[in-house]
Image (cartoon, grey):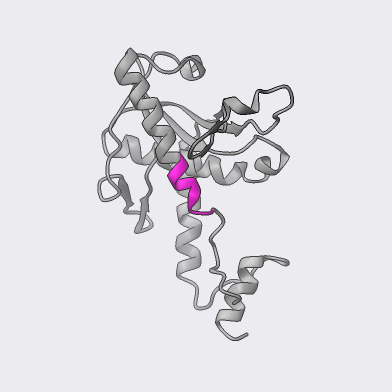
Amino acid sequence: MGFKLPFQIFPGIFSSLDSYQKKIIHSYFDKHRHLPPWLQSLGQGTPMDIPSLSEFRYHDSATDILLTGVPDELLQMPDSSIFIGDYKTAKHTGNQDALLPIYTTQLNGYALITEHIGVGEVSGLGLIYFEPQTDIDGIDVDALINSAGFNMKFAAKILPIELNLDMIPPLMQRVRQICDMDAAPEGRTGCKDCGLLNELMGL
């Protein structure tokens, strides 16, 4: 397999960046009692404690599917509704648009769980991009360098995602159909993960 695992599309460093971004936002809120300026377009939300993976889950009895996950951010809005945010350390480009259906499903899955476990009614979803600022033209480089390394600036951009809880049940039904098949369905032509899986199985 060339030491590559199938179905792994994100390097581990992004988990560290997500955690750091969350710490920055929550520490700023604890100090100033409001969100950073670049998040205030969402409204006066208050960061909430994120339930653990063992708590943030929903069992769909119709399909016997267990839906789990951990959102990056839950904000309680002034009307007690919930905004769910997902952090992305990347520039929002056309390549990101190719992943938008995945992100849309992910956030709506979080919304479904949020409402089913009684956290609150979800009123909004969004991707929060932290875009690395890599252009150093006209910048004092000495201001970026320190004794341990260098600093990189990031600019925040919010991409609203349509709230559509109705999209999740049909997907769970499709998962159940696939799981109940006698044999796995044929992979898509050109699917790299399918190729890695075939190598693992010696096909």
**Residue at left 65%, top 73%?**
195
Quarter-of-image position of residue 120: top left
Evaluate whether residue 186 shows in this view. no
Numbered disc total = 0
Quarter-of-image position of residue 103: top right
Specify whether residue 70 is painted magenta: no
Evaluate whether residue 124 shows in this view. yes
Residue 81 placement (x, y as % from top left): 35, 22
In the image, residue 170 above or below residue 154: below
Q: Main secondary structure of the magenta part?
A: helix
Residue closest to the far bottom: 202
Residue in front for this viewpoint, 171 or 39: 39
Residue 18 placement (x, y as % from top left): 45, 40
- Where, quadrant-wise, is the N terminus in this rendering? bottom right
Residue 181 placement (x, y as % from top left): 50, 73
Left or right: residue 74 compared with residue 203: left
**Residue at left 46%, top 55%?**
173
Residue in front for this viewpoint, 121 or 156: 156
Residue 179 placement (x, y as % from top left): 46, 68
- Where, quadrant-wise, is the C terminus in this rendering? bottom right
**Residue at left 34%, top 59%?**
64
Please state the extent of the stretch shown in magenta in the rendering: 11-17
**Residue at left 41%, top 37%?**
20
In the image, residue 33 above or below residue 149: above
Specify whether residue 13 is painted magenta: yes
Residue in front for this viewpoint, 62 or 2: 2
In the image, residue 129 above or below residue 61: above
